[in-house]
Structures are given as structure tokens and as C-alpha cells.
Image (cartoon, rainbow, N blue to C red):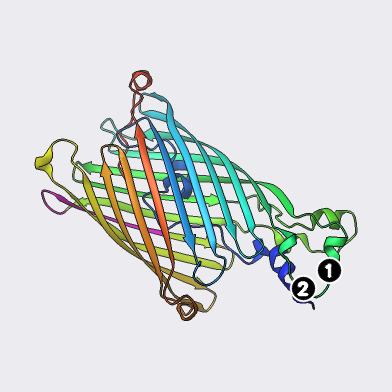
Amino acid sequence: MRIVFLLLGAILSFSAYSQDVHLSHIHASPTFLNPAMNGMIHNGMARVIVNSKSQWNTVTNGYKTGVASADMKVYGRKGNVVGLGLNVLADQAGDLDFTTVKAGLALSVMRSLDYQDRNVISVGAEMNHFSTRFDPTKLVGFEAEPLLALGLPNKSKYFSYSAGFGWFFNPDKHRSFYAGASLSHFNQPDVTFTKGLAQEGIVQTNFDAFNLFTKVVLHAGGTFRLGKNFKVLPSAIFTDQGPHQEILGGGFVRYANKAAGPDPIALYLGAWLRGYFEGDIRGSDAAVLSLRADVNKTYFAISYDFNVSTWKRASRGAGGFELSVIHILDLDKYSKKIQDVYCPGL
């Protein structure tokens, strides 16, 4: 086998042996985790979220990921709220500039189970369009790759569908709990580049081997008061996709000086540990440290994950930075038309 063919084969089987893009900022990517979180906005009517992450740049041409979303409450009456969300993702990785672009539309419905909005459930659904491509001019080898000569396209497109559920409980102003689950890619789309050539009988391939694995996400967390100015926000997320399982657990400690006024600047310090499971192989992947500041209705966060797996011999413990900004919009004139349901802060 030529080295070039092996490289190309790795690209063509990308979906069968890899996971979706994942972010370390649990609190800064709610709509990315679960479509039921669209419209679940605390102290506002609309929200804009931007996330940026880089990974493994000290070892090779690593991952560069950008995620942006906007969601809002579009209807609210008698304990019901309907949320609408738009999201875009762009990811680039590897020496062949393997690029994934996603654009999605999500709809959610929230329902208060009591008159005080202390117990709220939410369901959501999302439709996403994906496009992937690679740069064949960056393939390096001793001779030309025959599949390219046969007309192998360097682009692929497909649709993927997701659904989610969320539960939120606020027994009092000092405590809150939430839990959710989402199911992504349940239609298991074919993501190969060779499907067109196979349909024409030019190459032989097993389509089932290259369908995108369904992904299951379970997440939970809460907010608890520690004292006059301190709160703790534990959180955890479990992801299962094909042969890959991952768990991330930890939390923030929040400080806000109540004497500073009704909307003091809140500062957060957080840490998480990420572990992985794959058959009989398991261990710790990364330790994540994070800083966050809430200024009025804009939340800034920065985190860095330190590689603690056996891969640290190559990475020298380096992981990647992740940045995020969340901005909450009041939309005062619009909000008068909506009877809101109380949404907890994450």
C-alpha cells in the first residue's frame, strides 16, 4: 500500500473511527450540547454565544474549531415557552485541511410544571446540514493516487437530526438543579467521499461501515450557595458515540460581592477532569482549568486543557485554549408580548 493511499483511506473512514467535535466549556455551550437548551435563557429574551478552540497545535497541524449560535424565546403563555435557535460550526484539522462546516436550526418547547416555575421541562429538536472537504493538493507521495484520477470528489454533504430533553428544578433562590439528554445523528448519515463512485460502480465499498455513529449525551449540574458571596456550580457530561465514551466532571466556584449592588461582577474559577473509555482501554485524557467573568449580561470565559494521557509524551502536556463569550439580550419591547417562564442560570 502506498503512503498516500493510507492517508486517503484515513480520511474516507473518518466517520467510522472518530468522534464529533467537543468543547470543554459546559456552561458556555448549552445549545451545542442539547437542542432542548435553546430558549432556556436566564434573565433575558435572546442570547448570542461564540466559542473558539484550538487543540494539538504543538504536535501537528491540530484542530481549530469555531462555534456560534443565537437563540431566543419566540412565544410564551400560560407556563409554556417556545424557543428558536440557529447555530454554525466550522472545524479544520490535519495536514490535508480536513474541514467540517455545520449549519443548524433548532426548535424547543418549555413547560412549567407548577405555578412558581420551580419545576420546568424542555424538549427540543434540531436539523443540521454538514459539508466536509479536504485539500487533495496537499497529498504527498511517490505517485498519483488512482482514486483521484477516477474522479474522487474532495467534498461531501449530508443532513443530520438531533433531539433532546431537559429538566430544571429550583427549590429556592439559593439552589438549582438541571439534567438533560440528547441524541444526535440518529439517522446515521453516510459521510464518505466515495459514495458517488460506488453508485457508478467505479469502486466497491461497504456503505454501512462509514455511517456516522449516533451520539448520546447525558449532562447534569446545579448551583448551591456556600455563603453570602460564594456559590459552587458542579457539572458533568457523559458522551457515547460508537466505540468511544467520554466523561467530564468538575465545577466552578463563583464569587460576587453582594454589597456592590444588584448586578455585581461575578468571578469564577473552575476545574474539570476528562476521562475516556474505549472497550478495555480507559484512562484520564485532560485536566481543564477555567476562568470566567460575568459583566452585566455578558459572560467571558477562557479555559485550557492540559493533556494527562499517554499522548503527553508527544504533546509535552500541552492541550489547547478555549475562549467563549455569551451575551444576553433583553428585547424589552418584544418581551412585553411574552409571558415568560423562569429559566435557571447555568
Indicate the amino acid at tag 2.
Gly
Disc number for residue 83? none
Residue 126: percent from the left, percent from the top? 55, 41
At label 1, the amino acid type is Ala
**Quadrant in the picture for residue 200:** bottom right
User: What percent of the width, then of the height, locates residue 337?
Assistant: 37, 18
Task: Return the residue at label 2.
Answer: 141
Mark 2 crowdedness (10 Å alpha carbons): few <14, some 14-19, many ≥20: few
What residue is drawn where x is 39% and y is 29%?
80
Q: Is residue 199 shown left or right of residue 289? A: right
**Foreground residue, 207 or 11?**
11
Residue name at image x 46 percent, y 50 percent: 33
User: Pointers 2 and 1 in contact (CB under 8 A)?
Assistant: yes
Q: Nearer the viewer, residue 148 or 78?
A: 148
Horizontal arrangement in the rendering, residue 26 relative to residue 11 (left or right): left
Q: Position of residue 183 (x, y in %)?
A: 53, 51
- Residue drawn where x is 32% and y is 37% of the image: 42
Compare residues 54 and 277 and report the one nearer the observer.
Answer: 54
Q: Is residue 236 magenta?
A: yes
**Residue 151 horizontal side relative to residue 62, left or right:** right
x and y percentages locating residue 97 in the rendered image = 64, 59
Does the magenta stretch mainly form a helix, a strand or a loop?
A: strand
User: How would you rate the neighbour count of disc 1 (Cα within 10 Å): few for under 14, some for 14-19, many for 20 or more?
Assistant: few
Mark 1 sits on what residue? 144
284 horizontally vs 233: left or right:
right
For label 1, the SS is: loop
Which residue of the protein is positioned furthest toward the right in this rendering?
A: 201
Q: Which residues are magenta?
A: 226-237
Q: Is residue 309 above or below residue 323?
A: below
